[in-house]
Image (cartoon, rainbow, N blue to C red):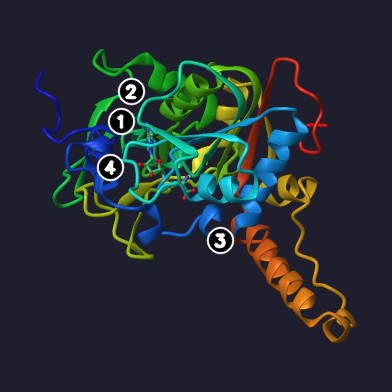
Amino acid sequence: MPPPTSDPPWKAAWDDALYGAAGFFRRESPSAHFRTSVHASPLFARALVRLVREAGLDTLVDIGAGRGELLRAAHAIDPDLDLLAVEVAARPDDLPDGITWTTALPESVEGVVVANEWLDNIPCHVVEMAPDGVARMVHVDARTGTESLGHPLTHSSVPSSISAWVDRWWPLDPAEPGTRAEVGSSRDTAWADVVRRVTRGIAVTVDYGHMLESRPPFGSLRSYRDGGEVDVLPDGSRDVTAPVALDAVAERVAGTVLTQRAALARLGVVGARPPLETAASDPQGYLRALSSATEAGELTADGGLGDLLWVVSVVGEVPTTSLTG
Ligand SMILES: C[S@@+](CC[C@H](N)C(=O)[O-])C[C@H]1O[C@@H](n2cnc3c(N)ncnc32)[C@H](O)[C@@H]1O
């Protein structure tokens, strides 16, 4: 029997749109299109440098490093750290010599590995409950964004790992046609592949996501371009992203989940304003402290970056840190 649609499944179209030969992330700088914690403030890098040093380590690896913003800040804070950026895009010309740049994951790492807003850009399959109560693969025309339903998950051409993941992590109700799941197994596998390379250290993935009790019922695919949200389209002209099922990721890597607000508080980033009295006695110090409090406030904001989730895995014998203790 011919397939129900000739369009590719979402995952294939998404992969091509972001990472194909002319893919979005091969040419575009993330910071030109959206703002992450590493753009918001060097306090984010300061917290990670503190984590590295508290753990008695001297290496920080950034997976999906953008244009190296996090490691540039880390280098300025602690020039003695070994810094490795892993990124599909080419090394920026102005990157300091003290930062190593590679497109391939390192074979092994002893240190802290961080991935900030990386997993949400790992393409995944999308499935939808059809009107007949059968969950099917969702396909998409990459030029128009028009979707069509493909084979049922039980079809011999659909890997059984897809229905196994959906049953466990994002079950769909046959009585609720139109409900969807974004199949996070590709994210789980991508992060597990990073964590297994850590011989001793701490692995941290940070992303916006959801847990079993709060999945978005109709899916959550989004696109961004030039700083704003635009129609979702996997044609390479824009970012394509979907929040991550971070409980599934955490289970795969024996990780602990906490909010960025809680994680950064443990690492000394709090948004408290300096006492007003110091404005008169030390105006410059007051302004510096105020600016730092404002940046910390953005990193930890309710309804904003503070709601991001950290999945933290400790590998091997590592001294207790304020994050992991
Ligand atoms: C959303 S951006 C985040 C950039 C940066 N970490 C930040 O917080 O601003 C995701 C980045 O991951 C990169 N990326 C995606 N898959 C990758 C892979 N397999 N290896 C290396 N980099 C990858 C993309 O090119 C992109 O720069």
Residue drawn at x 60%, y 49% as measured from the top left: 308
Mark 4 or mark 3: name the one nearer the start of the chain.
4
Q: Quadrant of ligand 1?
A: top left
| Quadrant into which the C terminus falls | top right
Disc 2 + disc 3, Cβ < 8 Å: no
Where in the figure is residue 286, as x and y percent of width and height?
79, 76
Q: Nearer the viewer, mark 4 or mark 3?
A: 3
- Using the image, tell me which numbered label, if any, was put on residue 18: 4
Mark 2 or mark 3: name the one nearer the start of the chain.
3
Q: Is residue 276 left or right of residue 180?
A: right
Residue where numbered disc 2 is placed: 153
- CA neighbours of label 3 inside 10 A, class few (<14), some (14 to 19), many (20+): some
Where in the figure is residue 42, as x and y percent of width and height?
61, 56
Disc 4 under 8 Å from ligand 1? The reply is: yes
Q: Nearer the viewer, mark 2 or mark 3?
A: 3
| Badge 3 amino acid | Ala
| Badge 4 amino acid | Leu
Whether residue 200 is visible, yes or no, is yes
Disc 1 + disc 2, Cβ < 8 Å: yes
Q: Is residue 117 left or right of residue 104?
A: right
Q: Nearer the viewer, mark 1 or mark 4?
A: 4
On screen, 279 above or below 5?
A: below
Residue where numbered disc 3 is placed: 40
Q: Is residue 206 left or right of residue 21?
A: right
Residues at marks 1 and 2, CA–CA distance in whole angstroms:
5 Å
Mark 1 or mark 2: name the one nearer the start of the chain.
1
Disc 3 under 8 Å from ligand 1? The reply is: no
- CA neighbours of label 2 inside 10 A, class few (<14), some (14 to 19), many (20+): many
Mark 4 lies on a secondary structure that is helix
Residue where numbered disc 1 is placed: 136
Residue drawn at x 46%, y 34% as measured from the top left: 172
Mark 1 or mark 4: name the one nearer the start of the chain.
4
